Structures are given as C-alpha cells and as structure tokens.
Image (cartoon, rainbow, N blue to C red):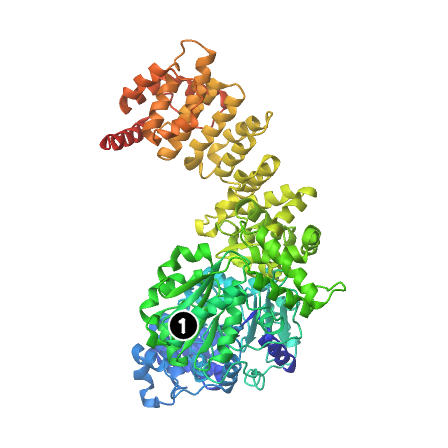
Amino acid sequence: MSDLQARLRLVARETNRRLITVFGSGISNQVLPTVDELTQLFREQLPPSDRPTFDTKIEPIAGTPLAYQNAASIVTLRASEYSVVKAIRCAVLKACRNIPSSEVTPTAESESKCRQLSDTTEGWEFPSGYRKFAEFYASLDGVTRGPIITTNFDPLIEVALRNAGIHATAVPIPANAAPSIEQLGEYAGLPVLHIHGYWTSRATSNTAARLTRERPSLDGLLRALLKSSVVLVVGYSGWMDGFMKSLRTRILDDADLLDTDVLWASYSKNPEHLANRDVLSELIGSPGFNLYLDVDGHKLFEGIAQEPGSPDGPSAPFGYSRLPVSMSSESFNLVRFVEGGQPGWDDVKFASWPVLSSTRMLQQELDHWLDQGGGGGVVAIGPLGEGKSMALRQIAIEVGESRGDWHVLWREPGAPRITEAWLQQVREDFGRALICIDEADLIAADLIATRGMWSDPSFGIAFLLASHDRLWWRTGISLKDRIIDVLFDGITVEDAKNISKAWVTTGIISQNGASEREAAEECADRLVASAGAMVDQHNTLFGAVLDVRFGPELGSRVEDLISKLSETPLREEVSAGDVFAGICVMQDRLDQYGSLGRGASRPVIAAMVGLDGVFADGKILETLGREAAITFAGNRVYSRHPAISRAIVGYLRREGKMREVCKLIGKAGGRLRDVGASEEDGYRDAYLFAQNLQSSEATAAAHGAVEGAPELLEPRVTMLATLRKEDGDRPLQYANEVAKRLHDYRDFWKNIRAFLVEFSIVLRSQGQAQTSAGLSALALHDGLGFTLDARRAGYALVSLAKSSARVRAQTDGNSMSEVPEICYALLERVKGSGHPEQHLLSLPLEKKDLEKARQLSADKLCNRLGPAVSKAARTAVEETDLEADYDAALSLNDLRRLAQQEYQADSRHM
C-alpha cells in the first residue's frame, strides 16, 4: 500500500493530468448493510405468500453477489422495480442516525424526504476511508481534482466531500442515458457519477441483465473523462458489468492515446487470487495499468493529504485552482516559454519575465474594479503570441499576494459553466473573488447570461480574462461597459529593454565578451527592429523573440523538431510529427495568424490519427504542447508563430513530404464528413483543403478526402474538379469510372448535379462539346437528385452556356443555336445580373438574340431550352454509360420556378 500512497503523492503534484477516482462498494460496506442484509431487505418487499419461493431460489447462493442480483430480479418481477428502490433506500437510511428504525420505511417511501436528506451533511455516518479521501481531495489543486465514479447508490461520498469543504453533485446514470462531457459542465459542484443509479431515483441497475448490458453512451463519456487522467480504482471487484466492459475497452485499446494511467487498488494480498478474474488477469500487463495488492481502502488516504498551497479557507470550486498554487523550481525549464511554450506558474515565479507595458495597463484597469468591490473586469485581447496568458498569470499572482481581501480563482480546462447558482456559491464561500480565465471566449455567453448578478459591485465578483481578439469580438464585445478590453499587439522600446535585461541576467542569451549592459542593449535593438518589421503581420512579440533567438537557424531547428516528433508513433503509421506538420500546413495555407478560425480543429487532429475527436486532448496534443509549443484559439490549434509553420512547409517541400501531409489532412476531413460531423467540428477546411492548393498537392489532398469517405460521391466531385486542372486523359478516365457506379454512393441524390457539371467541364476541355452540353442540361433536370436550388442551377447554366456556344461555333443551324443566350437570360433571373457578367463575359453571344431572350418570360425560356437540349442529354447518358435515370425528355419545372421567383423579386424593385 505504501507504493500506491507514494504514487498518489506524486499525482497530487502533477499539473498536466487530473485524478479520477472509482469507488466500488468495498468502503461503503463499513456502515451500510452487507450483501446478505440487503438481500433480506429485498425479501421484505414481497408479500408473505411469495417469500417461500424467494427463499428456495436464493438460499443455495446466499452470501454471493449473484444472490443479491437474483433477489433484485425476483422482486422486480413479482412486485415492482420501485420495490427494489425502496429496499435500497432502507439500506441507505441505516447510515442516517437522524432517522430512527421505526421511521426508516416511511422515509424510504418519500422521495422528497430522501432528497432533503441527501442535501444535508447532518446525521450521516460515513466510513473513515471516505473522510480521509475527502481530506486528500480537498488538498488537491483544481487542475488535479477530477470527477468521481461510483457503483454505489448512497450519498456518503458526497457527504464526506461536503464536510471537507468540496461542493459535490450526485449524477445518477442508472441506464445508458449518460450525460455528455458538455452536459457535465452544467453541474456547479464536483460531479459524482453513480453509474448504477442513485438512491433517490426511481430506477437503479441491480439485476444481472441490466448490469451487464452494453452502455455505449457511458462508453463515450468514459473516453471523454479518461483523457489525460490518472484513474484510481478502490473497493471495486471488477466483475464484468457494463461499466467494467467500457473501462476494459478504454484500457486495452485507448489508454496510451488517451494518456491514461490506471491505479487498481486490490484488497487481496495474493495475486493468484486475482488470476481467476478474467477481466483483471486480462488487464495486468497492459500499458498504463498498475495493480497494487494488499490495499485497505479505509487506510489508503491516511497521511497523504498535501500541505495546503493556498491560504486557509474553502477549497477551490471544481475545475478551479486557488492561488497561490504550489510551485517547484526542480523541473523548471528556463527557456521553454521563451521558445514558445505556454506559460506556467513557475515561469512567473522563477523566470523573471518582465511585466510588459500592456500588462501594466491591464492591471491598472483591473485595479479600478477591485477598488470598488467588483462588478466588472478586464480582458486582454490580441493575436496569438502577444503575451496575454503570461500577463494573466503575473497579475493573478500579484493580486493574490497584495490584496488579502480578494480570493483568486484560476479556471482550469474542463471547468463547469458559470451560472448564477455557481456564482452564488462562490460568493458564499469566498466573499470577494477574482475569477481568472484564459481563452475567455469559451465562457463569454455565460458572462452575458449572468451579468445581472456579477455586475453588481456589492456582489464581490471581478474577472481577469484573456482571449484572441477575433473570438472575443464575436460575443464578448457586448460586455464592453463592464469588461474593459486592453489590446496586446506588439512591444514598446521599454518592453524590449526589459526583456533583454532579463535574458542577459538569466543567461538565456550569451554576452559574447560584452558587458551585461552592452549585451542587453544590442538584444533590445534587435527586438525592436524585428518587431517593427513585423508590425503589419501580427504576432510581433513572439515573432521578434523567435527572430532574435534563432534568426536564420529557425529552419534547421524546426527540422530537428519534426524529426524528434516523428519518433513518437500514434496510430496507423501516423506519428506526432505528421500531425504537427498537418497543423502547420493548414495554418500556412488557411490562417497564418490564427485570426480567421480556420486552423486545424481538435476533431480534425484526432481524425488524422483515425480516432474520435475526444482523443485529441490526450497524448496527441499533450505531446505537441510539450514538444512543439502549439497554441489554441477557440477550437483551433496553431503553431506559435507563422514563421514556424512557414518553415515546416518549406522543409516538407524540400524533403518531398508535402503531398503526404496534404493527403493526411484531406483524409481526416473525409473521415469526419463520412460520419456526419458538424460545422463546429471544423471538418470543412480539411475536407475541402484541395481547393487551397496547387497541382500535385491539391490532388493529394483530394485523394485523401476520397479515402476518408469511401461511400460518398461529394469528395469525388472535388477530386474531379482538382484533376481537371491537369493536362492529359486522367480527368476523363476518373469521371468515367465514377459515372459507372453513381448509385453506389449514399449521397447520390445530393451531389449528382455537381458531378454532372464537373464531368461536363472535363468533356468540354477534351473537345466533346456536344456531350458536355448534354450533361450540363441533365444537371437541370427535375427528376435527378434533390430539388434544384439557385446555386446548383447557376453552375449548370454557366457550363451549358459555354458548351452550347462551342457547339454552335462548330456547326451551323443546330438545335442549340439560341441556347447560350437563353442560359444567359435565365442566369440573370436565377443568380442576378452580375453573375453572367462574371462567368460568361468572354462568351460570344448574339446581342439581338440575347435581348429577345431577356424579353421572354421564365416559362417561355424553359419551354425553349428543354426541347433544344433534350436530345443532347439523352445522347450524353448513352455515350458516358452514366448510371442515371432519364426518360428522354427534360423537365425544367424547378428551373422555371427559380427564374420566376427571382424575376418577380426584381420586378418589385423596378
């Protein structure tokens, strides 16, 4: 047991992973009825006439978990599920000293009375193991203290936590309807997940059938919870119930990528006793799984509570750390932040990074709100890499040290939403509280919803925030009268001097024989010059730092970085180096300065490795954050500066690896599209990445999207659009191959029109204008694909106009002689007058015929167009072996409708 205690002391000092504790019944049994006693309580729920049958079935297996499960099944079948719930309530009430034995049954029958008892800490007897655990948990920083999972029905864990000053909330999960990780964020207190149900609920999991069934929603929640976590399992036998099935899968398949360690505490002293348990024997030896023998859960947490790193008083709310936090210089890396790493508390404490001018302005604005007791706050806004996060930490520490009447709370990733109930609890616990939040755009909507409460100065709440300027202006700008923004964008001469002086003092830059003053002055001059050269490019602070630190050697440095990351395999022959390269390529091509929200999203990053989006925040981003100093803006991930991403792209092209990375990006987008990802997942930028590239790189990205979505026609349309920019027969060959199996794609009806237009463009480029015109016309047909809309109609009319004009130039007096002008007139009606001018400007048109067409109604235009191109459409289907239903006569009712709507709309404004 001492080994596990030592490990827990180490976990308590970690800042990059949280502790999630799983409790079985082994500890609660100290004060609650045993299995035999609970079985007897089940029996008492049956009428006397049914009890002999109960005894006959249960007595042979008495004292085993199977007896408990079968007893619950019998009561459910012969009485009701609610009778099982009442028996459980009676068992739980045995631990409530305020309820005399004569009142146990009446109380158990009242759900409201049970709920009232759950909300109080008075009168409950709880195990010493829970008391020591709660003391240990209360001593942890908010970043380390994770949710608790239990198979128990009772509220004793919550009672123990509340007694230790931690607000805990019971979350019943009796069936498969588990909350999402986002829904857990709605709870103001520390979530305690009761995965077999809660004693006040009207449904629990007790029978073998219910306990062992698959629980996919719980499985998804576990994946989200376990990422970057240490999981401690105490008092749990590990039999194969639905929860254990999920946990087993996560350990065997995902523990490495989720960055999860499992610490399994077994009461048994002999490992041979565990060999017969199939689940545990299977897990022993798996990566991340650690078995500890001879562990008494009642004594495990004795003497391991951390020395408090913050002043006496209430524990920090769930998801928050209370300043000051514990810091150690032992593992401090002096240059990590200077070279682009995210700042930590040790960087503020030990690195002597100077307080910059923008930081002083931010603190001055904050002092105004603190002096008047709260009611507002400040937000540092600006591009990536301008020192906002460091400024927040510097000010938070200063306020914590200089203002004894204010408590400083730092929000950690995964903290719950800010609600009025949460704010009220903070006020009751702390009085005055400064709430510090980096990436504040994530909670801007919460601040707007609760401003009626916190904006009152007498309420005692103030905010210290930071956000990318673009993201804050989306919603947070409406708070400008209460949250004052301070721009972080560049450095002053004074800032440069202070930075240089600190670098020389700490040895970050060498003096090269010069005095400290001379070295600092030279460094300051270089910083100012570099920042000035970048003034139009954003990221001037970190860009200048990179330039001064590495200069022309940046390229070789990022090459070394990619090589190092490539030695960290992730999955399916994809390394951390490949993923970082993908992040940099997307940044360089789509969003250099992180100001457009088009960098690689977390789901895209996970999909690069062929995984669900939940895995991004595990080993993948943990590795890249530590080794490559990536940064975040909303849900998007970037390198710390465009110079880095540009250097990576240059390296990839020199080494001939750019196409591989482009394919990886496209494939990730295809995977997300294939499973129905939403726009919020950011799939589109990766899925259509080919549109932002040239030549073979574009083809590689398009090919990746096809591989990622093998059953979709849409990425093949993009592939064809990319290929037709190439010379040769390849585009036509590809189009013919796709045409022969169109109905195999599950999105046929949605994308057939787009495919026909792309195919027609390829044919026109190959000199087959007649067939091209036929396919363009077919793309307007009512009976093919989803209802025609203005966008698809516009594409088809442009292609048909160009192809029919080429046919007219090649032959005299054919049926398409007036088609170009009809298409032009229809395009004006459907897309507006500017559209044909933009796309058909160079088209040779007969002016008289065009004016005549413009005078015709939409009905007459379509009546002329249909017969003129029907034969070409029929011939095109035959010549291309197109797998499409076409009955030899074009129907253009949808096109007629679109033209009439636009024509009538224009007429109203004439």
Q: Residues within 10 Å of mark 1 (few under 14, many from 20)?
A: some
Question: Residue flagged by tag 1: what amino acid is it?
Answer: His
Element type at mark 1: helix
Q: Given the current orientation, which residue lies at the most extreme top position?
A: 812
Q: Nearer the viewer, residue 565 or 336?
A: 336
Residue 218 coordinates in the image, percent (x, y): 47, 63
**Is 542 positioned to the left or the right of 553 in the image?**
left
Q: Residue at x 48, y 19 (%)?
A: 769
Would you place residue 326 above or below residue 343 in this image?
below
Task: Identify the residue position indicated by label 1 in the image.
Answer: 368
Residue 677 lies, with reference to residue 432, above or below; the image says above
Residue depicted at x 52% and y 67%: 391
Left or right of 851, for residue 676: right
- Indicate the position of residue 815 as horizontal and vertical percent values: 38, 13
On the question of residue 214 being in view, the answer is no
Q: Nearer the viewer, residue 572 or 186?
A: 186
Can I make out residue 652 in this image? Answer: yes
Q: Nearer the viewer, residue 645 or 106?
A: 645
Query: Residue 308: where, in percent of width, then height?
Result: 54, 83
Q: Quadrant of the C terminus?
A: top left
Q: With respect to residue 97, does 638 lie above or below? A: above
Q: Quadrant of residue 490?
A: bottom right
Image location of residue 379, percent across then percent down: 44, 64
Identify the residue at image location x=65%, y=75%: 329
- Relative side of 18 to 377, left or right: right
Quarter occupied by the N terminus: bottom right
Identify the residue at image location x=42%, y=26%. 798
